[in-house]
Amino acid sequence: MNMPILRLNKLSKTFERRSFWNATRPLSYAVRDVSLDLVKGETLALVGESGSGKSTLGLLTMNLLTASEGSVVFNGKPLEKAGAKDMARFRRTVQIVFQNPSAAFNPRRTVLATLAQPLLLHGKPSKTQLRARVDELLETVGLTPAAAFRDVFPHQLSGGQRQRVMIARALSVDPDFVVADEPLSSLDVTVQAQILDLLIRLQRERDIGYLLITHDLALVGEVADRVAVMYRGRVVESGPATTVCDAPQHPYTRLLMASTLSADPNERRIGAADTARVFDVPRDDGAGCSFAGRCPLAESQCKTEVPVLGRSGQPGTEVACHVIQRRDGDV
Amino acid sequence: MSDEASPLGARKNRAELFSWANTLRSGYGLVGSITLAILVLAALFSPWLAPYDPHAISSSYLGPPSGEHLLGTDLVGHDLLSQLLHGARVTLLVAVTAAVISFGLGVLIGSLAGYFRGPVDAVLMKVTEFFQIIPSLVFALILVAMLGSHLWLVTIAIGITIWPQQARIVRSQFLTLREREFVQASRALGFSDRHIIFREIYPNALGPVLVQATLDIGIAILLETALSFLGLGDPNKASWGQMLFGAQEHLERAWWIALWPGVAIALTVLAVNFVGDALSEWFNSRSDVGRVSLQKRKNVASPPAAAPSRTGDGTALLDVQDLTVHLRRGAKVVRAVDRAEVKVRPGERVGLVGESGSGKSMFSRAVLQMLPSANVETFTGRIALDGIDLMRLNEADMRRVRFEDLSIVFQDAMTYLNPTMRVGKQITEAMAGLSATDRQERTRQILASVALPTTTRFMRRYPHELSGGMRQRVLIAMALASQPKLLIADEPTTALDVTVQAQVLRTLVAVHTKTDMAMLIITHDLAIVAEVCDRSFVMYGGQIVEEAAVSRLFSEPRHPYTRGLMASMPGKSDYRLGKRLTGSVVDLTDVPTGCRFAARCELAHDRCSTEPPWVRIGDEGVRCWLFADESGPIGRSTDKPADSKEVTTS
Ligand SMILES: Nc1ncnc2c1ncn2[C@@H]1O[C@H](COP(=O)(O)OP(=O)(O)OP(=O)(O)O)[C@@H](O)[C@H]1O
Ligand code: SF4
Ligand code: SF4
Ligand SMILES: [Mg+2]
């Protein structure tokens, strides 16, 4: 296996909210004690429900948010100790593609200006070099002929085209790793498939690694090498994508898989199960397993002791669940 | 939502210019601008316009308006018209300068607070609050008393008094804009703070800041007036305020001395506010958040007078025939829906699937008679709900239909929930004719049916305190509250988590089996159709291109577009091998005369340059030349245009 480009080392992030009297108090953990290795050429899918901390983890990875605890290790050095030169290198190595291509551009800048900016920031190209490089980027992401796209404003493009420009912007600094936060979910289905093909092609050609943040489990089965499932800020299961998708262990992962639509009217999953359980999302007081309030397997231990990631019965996968760990330990 | 569904998001700069001109033209903006322009010109050219030197003393003092002195004279014998014109100079100069000072201070302090946040923000905002709490007049009084009453000192005092509002606006712009993804993206690319502030944030914060600066001019005029009136103005500069001050003692003998400056001040302040409002309206209209206003039906092809009010074939609950919706976008016409034919039978679960920009949302909004204001070019066809022709209802009756028989669940819950109303109340409000306690009870039942907590604590929450999935379920709960006959769900689960999506769909299915409510589910996701629907329509480029029972649609899609859609579904076995559709949806402002799918169709051939007919195959149908072959097109003469003739094969 390749050396990881980035190591996320026990990252935690709390958000604080100023109260009426200005005293700050911790609101909650958005990300808690997450360790992951991000590898060149490999796709790590990060799945979980909204609010589980996926985007926050993406931003932490990008150093667009500062971790409350733990660190992002780049080049063997934690980022908070990195100097200006290391930071500049980090910015060239790791890039991000956002979910919503219509919000991700300065509406007052043409495609050319948008793509030229990072090139100017990280180098001193001449005017003709700049234009050639922008054209090359546009062609790489399938916006051909480049001349037709250079001088338009983002809002004049379709969603798919905008997403391509965003990918081009990420590619402009020739990164080794791209954090893609729901890169497809705002796009048309036929365009999703095209953008996905583009991401896969770029990975093959440039050996780019992806942190693919997604809620689409069908997609995970198609493209990811590894998958990490997040729940309430923690990774609760991780392992090879095929193993996790075919034989989910953690009760939450199983719920996820059971919620995936079947894409086949003869094998409906909705309506087969009894109606949704009614629950007020329980307060997570930090004690015990945060899934306990929804978990069909919950036991008394689950309410008092936080399960930590440990080996499960499936090869290469880790699970944070008392019951599964005990079961597999007994086997 | 599809492109057409956000008609307020102006697309072209030209269009923006037009809308600016429109705002101005639309009444008060125009009045305000013209008044201001006249005032400014009058102030600029006052030496030439004024009939007298303002300091010249005429023989008549305290003279009423007359031929010689149009507005009369004051105690000393100054010509009031001349004084007024020269006073405009002073007043406007003070006001504009003070507004500029306030602008500078506000932008500086707001930016610092918004950019650095944390302790800097806390301290600066405390200072700002302090300035805001003390009444500005009192504060200006103190300042003038301390500094003296030279004109420029008064101006500075006013500027220092009024900046806090500007600072707050700038700060809040910073706080929202810096979370916007394009700003984050710049940070991700490693841009400096300076770059981000000046190139990314300021240009986008311009709108509200300019509006406030405009309003500040009005505030400054009033403050200057008040100061002068209290005797704290510059006695050597005859501003309008000074004129008022001078008029105080003679109010009873010579009302006109006070009247003119009073009128001038009121007019100017009003005009400034008009312009400010128009500006702010314009800036708001350019952002894509806005409420959908109800639109009266236009260009309705009125059916023959004898047509019965209960129409349609008796078995259909919703019977849409020949529905055409064209919208204006700038100079172009968006052919959002063209001759769509859709039937939903009672209790049926029907899908309408298509990509964004295929006209799905416009279809549903047409059914609801809620097309975007002012942009409707053509709106024809027949829409019957339970035999009632919705096209012919007046707005009040239509509102009742929407309230009782027809509900819709939109995708973007946050824009459709009232942010300032507790969720429980929002659901209760959607119910008709129950006692207060029954409503409470029913609200609890509905909340339970959509898998939301039924606690009072939950009902007292506001929309922003809920997660996306919860909001969506509140919206469904609101739609269910009136026990409608037809529920239209427009992308009801897009942007929801899989587990929540499964719950919401399960909720819809459960609600459906318990009532005889029919559902029309509009989605881009074939998997949802596969899970929930009995029958489905496929829409492309504003047209229905296929209609089929869901099981057949998946086992044997007919239209090449439907096949392409199937190949784009991850999870289907042929996903990796599947032939991708190239390109993106056809531009509805520029549809080809032939098959609208031709540019993306692998099977396109020469016939496809003319519009393919709707080929009916038993209960199903497809709009594609490939299927016209089997029995050859049999033109069925109907009242439809020739190019949409139907073909039937068996
Ligand atoms: N700026 C912020 N201030 C306070 N709380 C925040 C902030 N950003 C995120 N959170 C909270 O942190 C938690 C994790 O949020 P995050 O956006 O990372 O979730 P996510 O998994 O990306 O969700 P989604 O799928 O909806 O994008 C949530 O509880 C959220 O409310
Ligand atoms: S630890 Fe307990 S509550 Fe948590 S997932 Fe495992 S069984 Fe369920
Ligand atoms: S009519 Fe022609 S172009 Fe259109 S879908 Fe059929 S084969 Fe393709
Ligand atoms: Mg997110």
Image (cartoon, coloured by chain):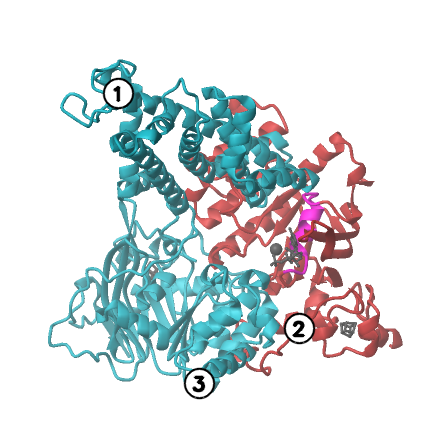
Of badges 1 and 3, nearer the viewer stands: 1
User: Magenta region: which residues?
Assistant: A51-65
- Nearest the viewer among A229 and A67 is A67
The residue at 59%/49% (across/down) is A199
What residue did someone put label 1 on?
Answer: B82
- Nearest the viewer among B612 and B130 is B130
What residue did someone put label 2 on?
Answer: A255
Disc 1/disc 3 C-alpha distance (Å): 79 Å
Whether residue A210 can be seen here: no
- The colour applied to the residues of chain A in this rendering is red
- Neighbour class for label 2 at 10 Å: few (<14), some, many (≥20)? some
Of badges 2 and 3, nearer the viewer stands: 3
Of badges 1 and 2, nearer the viewer stands: 1
- Neighbour class for label 3 at 10 Å: few (<14), some, many (≥20)? few
Q: Secondary structure at mark 3?
A: loop
The chain in cyan: B
Mark 2 vs ligand 2: CB under 8 Å? Answer: no
Q: Amino acid at mark 1?
A: Ser
Q: Chain letter of disc 3?
A: B
What residue did someone put label 3 on?
Answer: B515
B599 lies above or below B407: above
Q: Amino acid at mark 2?
A: Leu
Disc 1/disc 2 C-alpha distance (Å): 82 Å
A57 drawn magenta: yes
Mark 3 vs ligand 1: CB under 8 Å? Answer: no
Residue B401 x, y percent position in the rendering: 32, 74
Residue B470 x, y percent position in the rendering: 56, 68
